[in-house]
Image: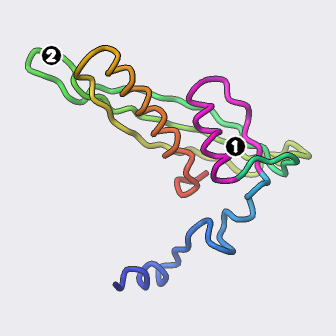
Amino acid sequence: MLAPLSLAACGFSPAFAPGGAATRLLGQVRAADPTDKNGFDLVERLEERLGRSKDPVYILSYSITTQAVGVGITTENEITRFNLKGVIDFSLSDAATGVRLTGGRVQSFTAYSATGSTVAGLAAEEDAAYRLMRILADPARGF
């Protein structure tokens, strides 16, 4: 019951609350065109959160790196679970001048099971990548 008060006391305010920090970016940012599935999923989520700009004030460029790391290993040395780590380096530039305004790096991970059929494993890996791009596109992470 006191949690909202403690958050308010520490200066926390939701990014998309009225007057929040991210509201001035709504409809103002155009992400670079995606070149692969991860990029497509990332841009899709960014546009869901920030809107699709027809006349952008800012251009967001990014590079995505992912790596699957085996974390569940049987006594027969077979991997049964993977962590999918993702890193996005990004830069926000003025659309009119091309001058870089800010940038940074966001990172996170998801996990998936490698047990079952080959098709099930591929579907789990694809789902983990989709979830990872949605997590990384969240403005609370630093975008």
Q: Nearer the viewer, mark 1 or mark 2?
A: 2
Choose between 91 and 23: the one closer to the eye: 23
Residue at the spot 21% in from the left edge and 24% down from the top edge: 80
In the image, what residue type sits under mark 2?
Asn
Circle 1: element type: strand
| Mark 2 secondary-structure assignment | loop
Write down the quadrant of residue 71 in the picture.
top left
Q: Which residue is mark 1?
A: 91
Disc 2 target residue: 77
3 sits left or right of 42 in the view: left
Q: Is residue 121 above or below residue 142?
A: above
How many numbered circles are shown? 2
Q: Crowding near pointer 1: few (<14 within 10 Å), some, many (20+)?
A: some
Residues under labels 1 and 2: Cα distance?
41 Å
Q: Position of residue 92 (x, y in %)?
A: 73, 47
Quarter-of-image position of residue 83: top left
Name the N-terminal-most of marks 1 and 2.
2
Residue lying at the far right in this picture: please name it: 96
Quadrant containing the N terminus in the rendered view: bottom left
Find residue 9 and report its horizontal and vertical position in percent: 47, 84
Q: Residue at x 60, y 66 (%)?
A: 15
